[in-house]
Image (cartoon, rainbow, N blue to C red):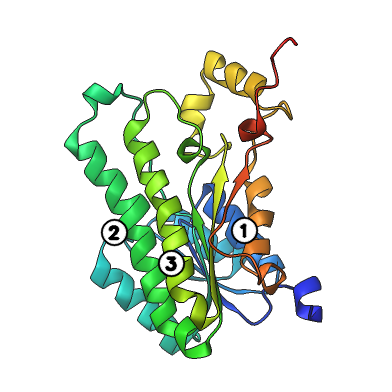
């Protein structure tokens, strides 16, 4: 293992983080800066993205990742102005309101599919064509969810979109392995982020989740960011096509059985 892998594992790598304006994406961007990466944060234009640029002094681009042409233009600009893309962490994602499956709307499905799956796919395609294939080297980290591993009630549309991200991760890992590109995914449990806070502030939901997680607490964005940096580095260079739960033990089993 090279010294870079141990000290600053992303040193010199143009590292694109989507959804970087807040939540897990913001934490990953911060961790990538600490790991030596040349970080480019992608998110919708607005104060979150402006704050990221001001606080971390990183490159930012406002882009809707569900827009294929806009994604291609953004990555082309990154490659020409900053350098070939070496790392992509696909943090951007959305969730819908809790609904029984029979009440899920087409709008719910379209929005989740557009961002969670199509956006992930478009960014991965753009990353490999704007640096990774030419370099015969690169690391892509996608974000699935524990909901893709163990079903959660009233989240059929979200679960389907994140299950698709897991399947896509395996497929891309196989397609791009001969280019020296690894593709992995992370499946987080409930993490305190702006997106999840309204749900987790409900006492019953928070208490039930904490009881179900063997480590006894909800996750923080920093719990996920370190795993993302590891998978984005050469330290994980022989891992590909995998989905790593970061869930406090949720998917390992039920902690409350009185046996």
In the rendered image, which residue does mark 2 sit on? 66
Q: Nearer the viewer, mark 2 or mark 3?
A: 3
Q: Earlier in the sequence, mark 3 or mark 1?
A: 3
Crowding at mark 1 (Cα within 10 Å: few <14, some 14-19, many 20+): many
Q: Quadrant of the C terminus?
A: top right
Q: Earlier in the sequence, mark 2 or mark 1?
A: 2
Q: Earlier in the sequence, mark 2 or mark 3?
A: 2
Q: Quadrant of the N terminus?
A: bottom right
For mark 2, give the secondary structure: loop
Question: Residue 97's quadrant in the figure?
Answer: top left
Q: Nearer the viewer, residue 145 or 32?
A: 145
Crowding at mark 3 (Cα within 10 Å: few <14, some 14-19, many 20+): many
Instruction: Judge left or right: residue 157 versus residue 143.
Output: left
In the rendered image, which residue does mark 1 sit on? 228
Label ID, residue 172: 3
Q: Please say if 78 is above or below 151.
A: below
Instruction: Determine whether label 2 and label 3 are within 8 Å by CB.
Output: no
As measured in the structure, the alpha-carbon distance from the residue carrying label 3 to the one carrying label 1 is 17 Å
Q: Nearer the viewer, residue 41 or 250?
A: 250
Q: Horizontal and vertical percent for residue 150? A: 50, 32
Instruction: Determine whether label 2 and label 1 are within 8 Å by CB.
Output: no
């Amino acid at each position: 293992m090279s010294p870079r892998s141990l000290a600053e594992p992303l040193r010199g790598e143009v590292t694109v983080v989507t959804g970087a304006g807040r939540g897990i994406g913001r934490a990953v961007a911060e961790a990538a800066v600490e790991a030596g990466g040349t970080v480019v944060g992608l998110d919708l234009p607005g104060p979150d993205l402006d704050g990221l640029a001001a606080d971390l002094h990183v490159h930012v681009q406002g882009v809707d990742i569900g827009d294929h042409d806009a994604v291609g233009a953004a990555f082309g600009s990154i490659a020409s102005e900053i350098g070939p893309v070496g790392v992509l962490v696909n943090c951007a994602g959305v969730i819908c309101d809790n609904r029984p499956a029979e009440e899920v709307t087409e709008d719910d499905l379209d929005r989740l599919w557009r961002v969670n799956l199509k956006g992930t796919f478009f960014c991965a395609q753009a990353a490999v064509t704007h640096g990774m294939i030419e370099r015969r080297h690169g690391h892509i980290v996608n974000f699935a969810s524990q909901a893709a591993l163990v079903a959660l009630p009233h989240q059929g549309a979200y679960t389907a979109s994140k299950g698709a991200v897991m399947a896509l991760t395996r497929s891309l890992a196989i397609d791009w392995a001969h280019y020296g590109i690894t593709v992995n995914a992370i499946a987080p449990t409930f993490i305190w982020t702006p997106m999840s806070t309204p749900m987790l502030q409900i006492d019953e939901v928070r208490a039930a989740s904490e009881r179900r997680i063997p480590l006894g607490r909800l996750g923080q964005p920093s719990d996920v960011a370190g795993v993302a940096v590891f998978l984005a580095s050469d330290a994980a260079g022989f891992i590909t096509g995998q989905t790593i739960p970061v869930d406090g033990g949720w998917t390992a089993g039920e902690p409350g059985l009185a046996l």
